[in-house]
Image (cartoon, rainbow, N blue to C red):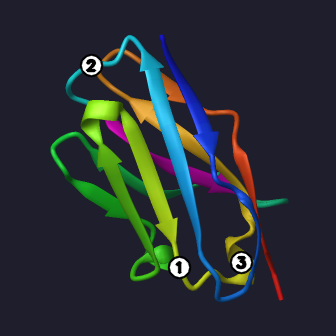
């Protein structure tokens, strides 16, 4: 299995920035996808951004131009730089890992954007 440890959530004012990190450990394959999903109160979980080991990325339309996903494959770590945060970005952000065998989820980290 693969374990995920997230860090970097918190409280920020609208327009501010936060950086999330997620480190994977365990039975990691050389080809995988890591990224972030989020779930706001009363809403379904949605994709934020994912990035493959080959560098292919996918972003939600709502975060394009504001969020940037990157990863350090040597450290099995994925990062989410979030700029120009909006009130509607408030959610629990969960790290996600997927390869041909497993799908794993992190515990989640709260991001709260205040006015």
Give the labeled residue for mark 2: 29
**Which dot, 2 or 1, sits closer to the camera?**
1
* Residue 84 falls in image quadrant: bottom right
Callout 3 crowding tier (Cα within 10 Å): few <14, some 14–19, many ≥20: few
Q: Residue at x 40, y 39 (%)?
A: 77
Q: Residue at x 38, y 60 (%)?
A: 69
Gap in Å between the C-alphas at discs 3 and 2?
Answer: 34 Å
* Residue 94 falls in image quadrant: top right
Depth check, front residue: 70 or 37? 70
In screen coordinates, is 62 left or right of 41? left
Gap in Å between the C-alphas at discs 1 and 3?
Answer: 13 Å
Give the labeled residue for mark 1: 83
Mark 3 and mark 2 lie on one chain; the one further toward the N terminus is 2
Residue 95 shows in the view? yes
Kindly state the secondary structure of the residue where label 3 is placed: helix
In screen coordinates, is 107 left or right of 106? right
Depth check, front residue: 43 or 5? 5
Give the labeled residue for mark 3: 88
Q: Residue at x 44, y 32 (%)?
A: 97
Q: Which residues are magenta?
A: 33-39
Q: Quadrant of the C terminus?
A: bottom right
């Amino acid at each position: 299995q693969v374990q995920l440890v997230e860090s970097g959530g918190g409280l920020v004012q609208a327009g501010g920035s936060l950086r999330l990190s997620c480190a994977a450990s365990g039975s990691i394959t050389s080809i995988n996808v890591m990224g972030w999903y989020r779930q706001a109160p009363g809403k379904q979980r949605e994709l934020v951004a994912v990035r493959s080991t080959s560098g292919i990325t996918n972003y939600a339309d709502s975060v394009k131009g504001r969020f940037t996903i990157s990863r350090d494959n040597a450290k099995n770590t994925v990062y989410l730089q979030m700029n120009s945060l909006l009130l509607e970005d408030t959610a629990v952000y969960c790290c996600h890992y997927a390869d041909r065998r497993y799908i794993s989820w992190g515990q989640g980290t709260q991001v709260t954007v205040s006015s």
